Amino acid sequence: MSIGSKAVTALGATLAVLGPAHFVVPDAFESITAPAFPDDTATWIQRNGAIETALGVTLLVKKTRTLGVIGLVAYGAHLGYHAATAQQN
């Protein structure tokens, strides 16, 4: 396992744990989520938790790792877009 592969695995494990945490302790994610998703923040906390769980699992499974990296880039762009546009409003 290369250093890059270990980093992706660690990131996958982190996301696989943080994703479900959005459902268990949603208040912990309120201050992070609200600036980018000021409308219906609670729903976005759940959506983000589901996305992060799925991405974490795809990064952990070697056969789906490439898809997971693509999804992670797309998710990062999605979050960045919402953060930027929310700040403009």
Image (cartoon, helix red, strand yellow):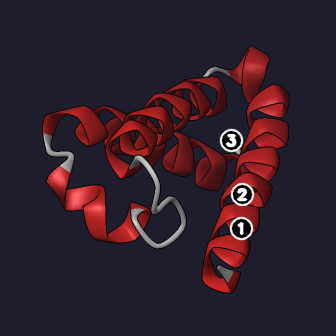
Q: Are marks 3 and 1 in contact (CB under 8 Å)?
A: no
Nearest to the eye among marks 3 and 2: give it. Answer: 2
> Does dot 1 land on a helix, a strand or a loop?
helix
- Farthest residue, direction top: 63
Q: Is residue 14 above or below residue 60?
A: below
> Residue at position x 65%, y 79% from top?
89
Q: What residue is disc 2 on?
A: 76
Q: Nearer the viewer, residue 19 or 79?
A: 79
The image shows residue 80 at horizontal and vertical percentages of: 71, 67
Measure the C-alpha gap from mark 3 to mark 1: 31 Å
- Looking at the rendered structure, the kind of residue marked 3 is Met
Q: Quadrant of residue 88?
A: bottom right
Q: What residue is disc 1 on?
A: 80
Q: Are marks 2 and 1 in contact (CB under 8 Å)?
A: yes
> Does dot 3 land on a helix, a strand or a loop?
loop
Instruction: Answer few, some or many: residues within 10 Å of disc 1's Cα (few below 14, many 20 plus, some between 14 and 19).
Output: few
The image shows residue 4 at horizontal and vertical percentages of: 73, 56
Mark 3 or mark 2: name the one nearer the start of the chain.
3
Whether residue 76 sits left or right of residue 11 in the image: it is right
> Does dot 2 land on a helix, a strand or a loop?
helix
